[in-house]
Image (cartoon, helix red, strand yellow):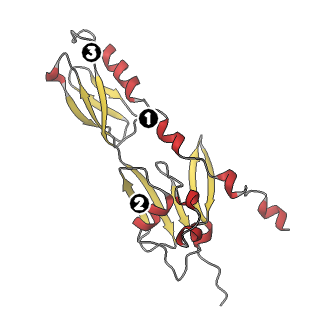
């Protein structure tokens, strides 16, 4: 009977994607990012924009531009084309001033709900932001991170009990992606 239950779980080491590579990947812009868009040849066009929920920014002359899902370099190219008739020097720089995203913490924590972060946040930090484990009920050894990737739900199980005991450094550094849900299950109690 037990083999069936274990079938969905991979070994904890295989399940954790390694993180540092992520930071090296070109940053993809997303809603909530604050962009500084500078036109070295036409400083009067310089602007600071927040990407709206629909993934767009609104710029003078060219109007609505989809920014979410692009890298800053791709957006620079796109804007150079859109502004080509306006610009003497074909230069546009896009800088991400700040980036914020939502993650959700639910289950046996003191303050479940949505957390907005503007920096990479680990599952452990997210739980601490949510007031920490509800120690009377939380099973910190089986915390789940639920992530939607390519339209499918993936679960990663983290043993954060080790982190609380000062062990399991790689588990402590499990970084969350936007819209991840951190679920802290309750311990079984026999009444």
* Residue neighbourhood size for the residue with mark 3, other residues' Cα within 10 Å, grouped as few (<14), some (14–19), many (≥20): some
Is tag 1's residue or tag 2's residue first in the polypeptide sequence? 1
Query: Residue 128 placed where, x, y %?
Result: 43, 67
Give the structural element (helix, strand or loop) at label 2: strand
Give the answer, above or below, for where 102 lies relative to 78: below
| Residue at (29, 24) in percent of width and height | 93
* Residue that carries the numbered disc 1 in the rendered image: 28
| Residue at (72, 58) in percent of width and height | 9
Give the answer, above or below, for where 13 lies relative to 52: below
- Quadrant in the rendering for residue 137: bottom right
- Quadrant in the rendering for residue 75: top left
In this picture, residue 157 sits left or right of residue 79? right
Q: What is the spatial separation of the Cα atoms under label 1 and label 2, in whole angstroms?
A: 22 Å
In this picture, residue 82 sits left or right of residue 68? left
Q: Nearer the viewer, residue 165 or 157?
A: 165
- Quadrant in the rendering for residue 74: top left
Query: Residue 83 placed where, x, y %?
Result: 27, 15
Give the structural element (helix, strand or loop) at label 1: loop
For marks 3 and 1, give the one nearer the viewer: 1
Query: Residue 156 placed where, x, y %?
Result: 62, 56
Task: Give the residue furthest to the left.
Answer: 44
Q: Nearer the viewer, residue 163 or 55?
A: 163
In this picture, residue 101 sits left or right of residue 135? left
Is tag 3's residue or tag 2's residue first in the polypeptide sequence? 3
Q: What is the spatial separation of the Cα atoms under label 3 and label 1, in whole angstroms?
A: 22 Å
**Marks 3 and 1 close (CB-CB < 8 Å):** no
* Residue that carries the numbered disc 3 in the rendered image: 83
* Residue that carries the numbered disc 2 in the rendered image: 114
Query: Residue 101 placed where, x, y %?
Result: 39, 49
């Amino acid at each position: 009977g037990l083999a069936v239950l274990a079938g969905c779980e991979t070994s904890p080491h295989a399940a954790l994607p390694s993180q540092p590579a992520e930071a090296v990947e070109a940053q993809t812009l997303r809603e909530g990012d604050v962009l500084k868009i500078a036109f070295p040849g036409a400083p009067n066009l310089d602007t600071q924009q927040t990407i709206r929920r629909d993934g767009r920014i609104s710029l003078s002359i060219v109007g609505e531009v989809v920014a979410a899902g692009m890298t800053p370099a791709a957006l620079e190219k796109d804007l150079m084309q859109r502004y080509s008739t306006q610009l003497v020097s074909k230069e546009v720089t896009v800088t991400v001033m700040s980036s914020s995203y939502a993650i959700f913490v639910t289950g046996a924590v003191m303050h479940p709900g949505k957390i907005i972060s503007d920096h990479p946040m680990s599952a452990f930090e997210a739980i601490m932001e949510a007031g920490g484990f509800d120690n009377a009920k939380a099973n910190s050894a089986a915390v789940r991170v639920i992530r939607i990737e390519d339209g499918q739900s993936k679960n990663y199980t983290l043993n954060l009990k080790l982190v609380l005991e000062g062990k399991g450094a790689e588990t402590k550094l499990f970084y969350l992606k936007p819209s991840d849900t951190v679920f802290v299950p309750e311990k079984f109690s026999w009444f």
